[in-house]
Amino acid sequence: MLVKSDFYKEIEAEFKIISEKEHLGSGGTPVNNLNTKMFYLSKHQFNSYLEFDQAIVTEIASTLQSLEDIIVKKALTYQELARDSFNEDIDPQKWIDYAQNEAQKLSYEMYNDKEIKYLRHFHIVWLTWVFCDEELKKLRIKASRDLYHHIGKVEKDYVKKRTEILKSKKDEEKW
């Protein structure tokens, strides 16, 4: 018989609250991957509660590291896209700090300390990841839309110029 530690039960309950409220469902996000890993860890036989708790903490720490790495990559991509598309200089650290500040406010707004005690930092990092992902998507859409309009303007200018050249050739032929 598999016995779960009290620590795991609390983590599992908090994770369930977050999963339900965030509508995580299924998909390839780091949080869903952690949920799957926790499920398989709960089915594994450990020699002691301490080993079990260490395995859970290790998986959470690994997921946090993964999320933080992805956030940094998104910030650098955001900076590069803003510079290339709009000639704006964005400081990635300030962008991440802003995202994390907003995520922290939202986390405390969504859950009180009784609902989330152990996974507060995890939830804040997760919300930061979501914020950065959404902002990067918005910037990509805006950049591609502006590029599309720019291409359209260039094409329109080319058509105008070509029409003028053809018109001037016809006028020359008439004289």
Image: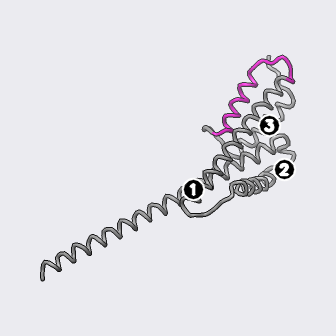
Q: Is residue 162 left or right of residue 105?
A: left
Q: Is residue 49 left or right of residue 72?
A: right
For residue 120, the mark is none
Residue located beneath label 3 in the image? 13
How far apart in space, not on screen, are marks 2 and 1 (Cα)?
Answer: 37 Å
The residue lying at 87 percent from left, 45 percent from top is 114
Above or below, 123 relative to 173? above
- As for residue 44 lying within the magenta part, the answer is yes
Measured in 3D between alpha carbons, the distance from the residue under mark 3 to the one under mark 2, in whole angstroms, is 14 Å
Residue 112, labelled with which disc? 2
> Is tag 1's residue or tag 3's residue first in the polypeptide sequence?
3
Magenta stretch bounds: 29-50
Which amino acid, mark 3?
Ala
Query: Residue at image x 44%, y 61%?
Result: 148
Residue 24: percent from the left, percent from the top? 66, 42
Label 3 sits on a secondary structure element that is: helix
Q: Quadrant of residue 14?
A: top right
The residues bearing labels 1 and 3 have C-alpha atoms spaced at a distance of 40 Å
Q: Quadrant of the C terminus?
A: bottom left
Way the structure is coloured: one colour
- Crowd class of label 2 (few under 14; some 14 to 19; many from 20; radius 10 Å): few
Q: Amino acid at mark 2?
A: Asn
**Residue at point 60% right, 51% down?**
77
